[in-house]
Amino acid sequence: MDDIIRFTAQVNRVSTLADGGIRITLDLPENAIETATAMMQAKLQGAVLECAVVAVEGDGRNTRNSTEIHI
């Protein structure tokens, strides 16, 4: 899987797991079907993702800042 999956998301939750791991939940806009599909394909392939996150100004759809994730 060599393609870059780019999308804008909002951090919904950050939590600690019982084993000490960290889970981050992201909310994507309703039109991010292709992104969701690509992420599901990555999961099915057992891919490990390398992420670089860049904070960007909100797009007016919500009151919190959005976060652009480059994977």
Image (cartoon, rainbow, N blue to C red):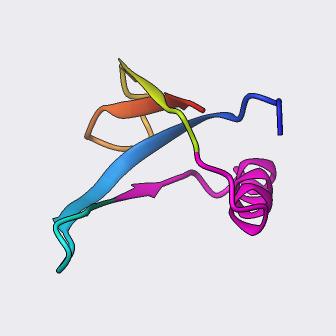
Q: Quadrant of residue 66?
A: top left
Against 28, residue 2 (above or below) is: above
Q: Kindly give the residue lying farthest to the bottom in the view shown.
A: 18
Vertical placement of residue 32 versus 51, above or below: below
> Residue at image x 78%, y 51%?
38
Task: Give 44 or 9, whichever is nearer the viewer.
Answer: 44
Task: Locate residue 42 relative to residue 1 in the image: left or right.
Answer: left
| Residue ID at (78%, 61%) | 45
Report which quarter residue 2 is drawn in.
Answer: top right
Q: Is residue 21 above or below residue 38?
A: below
Q: Quadrant of the N terminus?
A: top right
Q: Is residue 48 left or right of residue 39?
A: left
41 or 57: nearer the eye?
41
Query: Quadrant location of the C terminus?
Result: top right
Q: Is residue 59 left or right of residue 62?
A: right
- Region rendered in magenta: 24-48
Where does residue 10 sit, x and y in percent of width and height? Answer: 39, 45
User: Quick one: 58 or 14, which is closer to the camera?
Assistant: 14
Residue 47: x and y in percent read: 68, 52
Of residues 12 and 18, the one drawn nearer to the viewer in this rendering: 18
Q: Position of residue 19 (x, y in %)?
A: 20, 75
Residue 53 lies in the magenta stretch: no
Image coordinates for residue 54, horizontal then vertical, percent:
40, 19
Residue 43 falls inside the magenta stretch: yes
Is residue 13 found left or right of 7 in the rendered image? Answer: left
Q: How many marks?
A: 0
